[in-house]
Amino acid sequence: MHVPPWLPYAVITLVSWGVVGLLQKLSTNYISAESSLIWLVVGFLLLEPLLYPGGALFHYSGWNLAWALLSGVLNALGAWALFAALKNGGKASIVAPLTALYPLVVIILVPFILHETITKLQVVGVVCALIAVILLSA
Amino acid sequence: MILNDTLKARWFWYSMACVLCWGGWAMLSKLGSREIPPETMQFLFTVGTIPVCVVLLVARRFRMERSPKGISYGVLNGVLSGVGGLALFAAYHTNSNTSLVTSATALYPMVTVALAVLILRERLRPVQAVGLVFAALAIVIFSM
């Protein structure tokens, strides 16, 4: 079996974010979801000294640096919008599966922005993944 | 009728805002990762989250619950999320298919559900069991 090079990384993401999902349930027993977002960013900041790129930062294109920064802004805004949905009468059993559908935005945009193609079998895989996240977050 | 009520509900539009923000986050993560290595991506990503965090703090008038347990879980979540983010940027950096990486990494609720059953002794609901089957199918297809 040929394992695609991205898959081992994706597994690390799955496991660490999966644990975060569990700990999130535990943390909101003690503090609000918004406070937990603030402490989450404090956790991000603890990693910063290890990640600091130094002068290498200035070798990358301005656009790509902007995309990286903006990805952080959008991620945090998305989390805030999720908490707002739950505070404004959204049931977790509906809001969670709905917001888990964010890969759809990427799947719709990719052909226009990156000109990538996927095989028919991979389309089946993507559909399975989307059904799975809806059912698992319900 | 139900659809009409939903479209008028604030929670629905907040949910849509969330989907669009997270979709944008994943798309931009890929665009940046074509050139920038994962460590630097995660570094910049974190810098991007700070202004939102500050606005959130101001909106809450700096009110924070003083629960050591809650705070510890929150900070630990940040470190773990950061590690997961780093791996996501690494996956995007491998010049891989963006739709596959994004859908595969979005499957993390499968791990949460599995851990909730194993550690918190929650019962696996039938709908979640079916979800796990679809998740497994997706991963098998992606690894072919």
Image (cartoon, coloured by chain):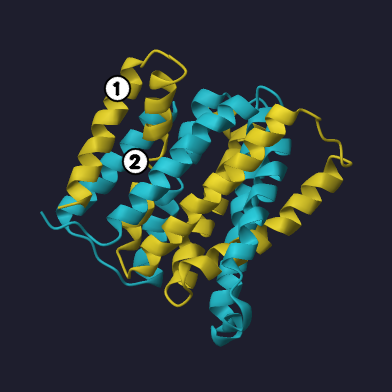
Chain A drawing hue: cyan
- According to the colouring, which chain is yellow? B
Mark 1: amino acid = Ala
Dot 2: element: helix
Mark 1 sits on what residue?
A: B129
Outermost right residue = B61
**In which quadrant of the rendered view does residue B67 lie?**
top right
Outermost left residue = A1
- Subunit that carries the residue with mark 2: A
Image quarter where the N terminus of chain A lies is bottom left
Mark 2: amino acid = Leu
| Residue at 82% from the left image edge and 35% from the top image edge | B64
Dot 1: element: helix
Task: Return the x and y of residue A136 as percentages of the image width and height.
Answer: 39, 29
- Subunit that carries the residue with mark 1: B
Dot 1 crowding, Cα within 10 Å, few <14, some 14–19, many 20+ = some
Comparing B23 with A35, the one in front is A35
Q: Is residue A47 visible?
A: yes
